[in-house]
Structure formats: structure tokens, C-alpha cells
Image (cartoon, grey):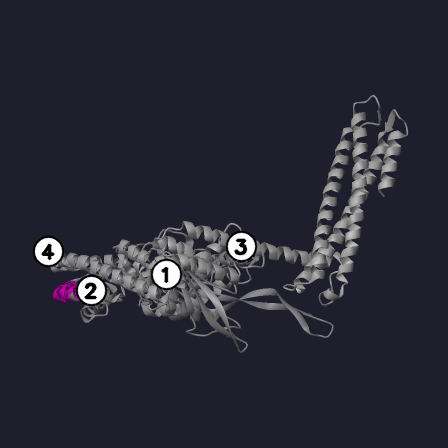
Amino acid sequence: MRKLITACLCLVLTACTSVVQIPELDRTVTRSQQQIQQTTRAISAEYQISHAQFLTVASRAKGQNLSSLNQLNDEFDQLTKLTQEYEKRSAELYKASATSQKTWKGKAQITSNDPEWESLKKFNDLFETESQALSSIRAQIKSTQLAFKETLKQQELAPFIARLPQYQHQARGIIAKYEQEQAYARYNLQLLDELAANAKSTSRDFESLAKLAQFNTSAQHRTSRPPRGYPGPDQETLKKASKIISAVVNPSIVAAAEQFATKQKPNNDISNTLAPLKRGRFSYLASYTSPENTRAIDKIFADRKTDILREIVATNSTKQKKILASSNTERHKLRNLVSLRKELGTSYQALLNEPIIQTHLRDLQQQRLGLLASISPQLISSINASKTLTNFNNPLPELTVPEDNKTAVAQKIKSAWSTKLDALLAFKPAKNESELSINSFTSRGLNYETELLAIYLGDFKHARLERNSTSLSALYGKYLSAYGTHCHAYLPSNKVAITKTECATERVTRNGWGTVTDTTCVKWVEIPTGLYADPTLYYSHSRHSKSAGLRMAGQILNFSDPYASRSLVDDLLSIGDDMSKLVMKNRCDNAGLNRFEKNLYNFVEGNPPLLLPGKETIATIQRVDKINFNTDNLNLKKLIDELIKENSKGWMMNRYQSGSVSSLKIGARNRDGSPQHVTASYAFSSMGKTYGGNVSLDFSNGIPNCLYFSDAPQTCRHPSRRIVNRYQKGLYSK
């Protein structure tokens, strides 16, 4: 091949001593480049197969001292050297050819008078020299390949040559695996080298020793990651690393722990930083610390922790004595003691279960309860003397902490307050609008209790209902039906019939066998239900129902979530028979029910609300009964269990297993400690089998807002209104 290429190129250059035809020269050079590339690819392919064969034999014969294996190794090394030399020189020649072609690009010919003539002659000399060299190397490669193959046939290697790779694609896989193993070996070696260097430079203080001991963790987060398929250091590397770390940590750890413990100050962190070594923040140090040293460290930490706890108690006791010795009233002292307890809980929440702190908390509680008992008669008397909600406040939130609420004295005050609140909120029907008050209407015990009361009060902002929603339309319609059922005699003389839509004519489609495949209503008619309604309200409801229906249809058509309409089912389940109960509770001749009706109409139509003389709002009632929604004070497991149980009434195939809520996790919290996001697991059955699911509960404005189930994670399922109202009343507190 070399002779042919060189002869062709020389022929082009010497055909005319003074002129070279560039097109012909270009064709010759291009043909030469293609042949060089083809030969290089063939050599590389042959080398890959030889490489894979050598790796396979070497791996199988690992640990054995065989002369044939040594000979094979030498031949492979020679083959590697020759192949690399050939690939290097062929690449350089290819590059030189391409560079030379650029010098005469665009020319038709070059004569001996052109400046390119000398460079053309030099290129010819280079090409001839390199072609001879490449041919020589190629011959050596062939000779070495033959020797390599002959060595593979030697009897000594016979046990190791079965099913050797014969094709390039097989060779690539073996080489890639080998290179990955080599990279992993380098990775482990590099880890140990870095660890050894860090061990020499690591200070002997506790934090530095702890950082050194985090070898496995730091290895996972290094910039140079292990090769794909390897999770981290191998076991041998971990064993060597353990010896290096132990040699540094164990001799110095006790003295370092003493210095570290001395520096610790009163704070929440000591529950972890000064915990027993195997259970605390520095548990990873235990693997590199002898049992004797571990016991010594545990004692050092325990003694220092005890000293800090006693310091906390002493500081708090001093504040307690100062409060009790002050000249303030007993109620003022009690408020200060409550603030002191809350401050202790905020500053040292993680330490409250420590025996020393528990003893101090019991002493603090005795002081609070003594003061509470002394002012209890005065509190109860003040509660009983209240005439309106205006200045009626629950005294317990500012005079107690959660652990006090179940004591006898607190329960006595709470009972008096609850009794009085019930009396102040007792239902008293009004004969006319001039007598209207907050007592003239009741929705207590209904699923939509807060929403309906907000409409009566004219507190539309807190009604928690959307004006154009299908749920409001359903509630509106059910009210008209309930009023028509129970208060027929109170309807105006121009009352109108309540109708329902029914299909009068259906189009039935059958297939060739007579089976019905489709039914479509082609004519609808309005059928009287036998009930009547106020025409103004009825036509208002008809307009609203049509608008809400179109809006819901648009949402379903434009939303890819197949469960999007489930929120309507949730709301309808919550409404239940609320409207029938509402009408019966409030009596047909009650002006309060008439006010609710007017405000319901105003709310739907977007008109301003009618307010009571005292302008009471939902906030008026919530201010009276302040609930602690701090996450630590809530039974969230019970809340989620009952929300799922209520929501599952609208499920089709699945059946919720009551009480199966587990793995509760609290996400973000608000500033007051109330939850923003909670997740949990639960169990359900379907077709006789039990499955697990996950649910997320989001809160908005402090109350449950959306349930997201794992089978439809983007769909907001509306929580039961009944349970939401129970939550607002504090019925899910611990």
C-alpha cells in the first residue's frame, strides 16, 4: 500500500517538472488519507480484541506465576507500544496532509515559480518518510500479533483461554469494565491518600476529631465521585481508613471530650452534643473509640450535662422567687409565672423531659396552681357576672400552660366559663329585625356551622365559600327546598314551584345484535317537585346554578386531572342535610332565619351584607374562645384519621381502614407554631387486598384546606367542613 500511495504522489509531482495539477493532487492526497484512516481503524480493532483477551486471561490466572503468562504480558506491552506509535504517527501524517491541502486550496495548478512549490516538495518528502515508517510499524504489529496468538495456544495457558472475546463489541465491554475497575481502584487509593494527609494535619480538639471520623460521609460528598455503579469506598478501603482514623482519634478523644464539654453552655443542643457517644450527634466517633474511652466520655458528658441542667434550674428558680416576692397582685404573679414557664419551654424544649427539669417543672406548677386556686373564686364570679360577649374572655389562656389545663382547679374555671358562654350564645328567636342579636340564629352542630353563621352575621369575608362555586349553589338549592318543606305557610303569595329537570325523550342506539350501545336525551322538561319558593330567591338560585355549572364544566374540560370534580363530591357530602336541620333549628317565624335568608341572597348576588346592631363577626366569637393551635398541642394523627374516614365516604372501589394512619411528619410551621403542611401514611382495602397510601394535608389561614392523596397527588380534596369546624373549636387538642 505504501509503495502504491508514494508512487501515485510522486507521479503527480514529477509528471511535469515545472507544473503540478492541483485537482489530481487533491484526489491522490484524499485517497491516501482514507487508506491511512482505514488501516488505523483496523489496527485499533485488532488491538482492542488482543487487549480484551489479555485482560481475560490475566484475570483468570491471577496469582499464578506462569512463564507463558509473563511472555504474554511482554508481548502485549510491545503490542501496546507499537499500536500507540502507529496511531500517533498516522494522526500526525493525516494532520500534515490536511494542512498542506489548505495551502493550495483554490488553485488549479502550482508551478516551480510559485511560493507553494517548496512546501509541496517538503510535504512529498515527509509523506514518503512517514509512509515507510508506518509500513514498518504495521509489519512489527502483525509479527507481534502472531506471537501473541501463539503464546495463547501454549499448554500452560489452556485452562484460561476458553471463550475468549473474538469480536470488537465483546472487547469493548471487557475493556470498559476493566477501565471502570481501574478507576475505582484509583478512587479508593486517592481517598486513603487524602485521609492520611488529613490525619497528619488534624488538630486534636473534639470537633476536628469528629470531622476526621466522618470519613464515609465525606467520601460520599467529594468533588471526585466514585465511578458509576460504585456507591462509595470498598470494604478494604473502609478497613484501612478505620485503622488510620482510630490511630488518631482514640489516643486523644478523652482529653478532647473534656475540653469540649467544658465549653458547652445552656442551650437545647446539649441534648445531642452531650448525649452518650453512641446515641448523640457524634455517634460516628464511637466506631473509632475503645469501650473504655467511650465509658469515660459518657461520664464526662453526663456530668457536664447535669451541671448545665442545674444551672438552668437555678437561674429559673431565682426568677421564680423574684416573681413571688414582688408586690404585684396574685393574678399578675400568676401571669408572670406562666410567662416564665413558656420562656423555659421555648429556650429548652429539648430538655423538658430531663429528670432534673421535670422536678423543677412540678415545683413551678405547684406555685401556679396555688395562685390559680386563690384567685379562682374571683375569676368564676367575674365570669358569671358577664352579660354580653363584648368583654367576655376566657381567662385560662393567660393564666395556665397546657399541663395545667387538666387539673381540678383549671377544669372548674373552664366549666364555669363554658356554661356562661353557652348561656350567652343560647338561641333566642327574634320576633322582628329590631330584636336581632347574635343569639337570634343558630348553626351549632352543623357541618357548615362557621360558614352559615358568617353569612347570618354578614361577615362574608370569613364565610369560606366561593360565590360562583357549585357547592354554594348546592347549599342555596337545599335551603330553598328545606324552607319549602318546613315553612310552606311563610312563603309569599307569589311563590313559585320548585322544579327538577327530567328527560322526556331519549334517543337509543343499538348495534346489529340489538344491544343498546348509547342513550342520549333529546328533550328535557321541568317537573314540579311539589315544593315552592320565594320567586326572588328561586330565580337567583337558577341563575347562579347555571353559572356555577358552566364554570365547573369548563374546569373539567380544561383540566387534565381526571379527579378534578371530586371536590364537588367532597362538598356535597359535607352539606348533607345541614339545610333541613338549619331551618328546623331556627323556626320559620324567627327573624334571625329571615336575616340569614336575606344575607344568603346578598352574598350570592354580590350585594353588601346586612350587619347586626353590635356588628359582631366570626372574630368576635373566636376572640372569646382562644384556641392553642401549636403543633405540639394538637392530635394531628386523630385529625388526619377522621378527615380520611370522612373523605372515604365518597370513594368508589377503595375502603379506608380506620385508625391506620402512621408515619406522621410535620413540615413547615407558622410563627405561632401551628402547622402548614403534614404528611402521613394510611391503609386501605380494595378487591379483598390491603394496600398502603400516602396523604398530605395543607393548612390555609390556620385551618385544614386541602387533602392530597397519592393516587391523585395534584388534586385538592376538600376536607370535611364538620371536622374543620371541630378543629377550630379545639377538639383536636391533646
* Tag 2–tag 4 contact (CB < 8 Å): no
Q: Amino acid at mark 3?
A: Leu
Gap in angstroms between the C-alphas marked 1 and 3:
69 Å
Quadrant where the N terminus is found in the figure = top right
Q: Position of residue 456 (x, y in %)?
A: 33, 59
Q: Amino acid at mark 4?
A: Ser
Q: Which residues are magenta?
A: 367-382
**Residue marked by disc 4:** 326
In this rendered view, identify the residue nearer to me: 158 or 306.
Answer: 158
Is residue 627 visible to the viewer in this orientation of the structure?
no
Callout count: 4
* Left or right: where 474 falls relative to 23: left
**Residue marked by disc 1:** 451
**Residue marked by disc 3:** 189
Tell me the SS state at disc 1. helix
Q: Position of residue 191 (x, y in %)?
A: 50, 54
Question: Is disc 4 surrounded by few (<14), some (14 to 19) or many (20+) residues within 10 Å?
Answer: few
Gap in angstroms between the C-alphas marked 4 and 3:
70 Å
Tell me the SS state at disc 2. helix
The stretch drawn in magenta includes residue 303: no
* Tag 2–tag 1 contact (CB < 8 Å): no
Tell me the SS state at disc 3. helix
Gap in angstroms between the C-alphas marked 3 and 2:
55 Å
Mark whose residue sits in front, 3 or 2: 3
Secondary structure, magenta segment, majority class: helix
Q: Is residue 540 above or below residue 681?
A: above
Residue 360's disc number = 2
Q: Specify the quadrant of the image occupied by residue 388.
A: bottom left
Q: Specify the quadrant of the image occupied by residue 371.
A: bottom left
Looking at the image, tell me whether mark 4 or mark 3 is earlier in sequence order: 3
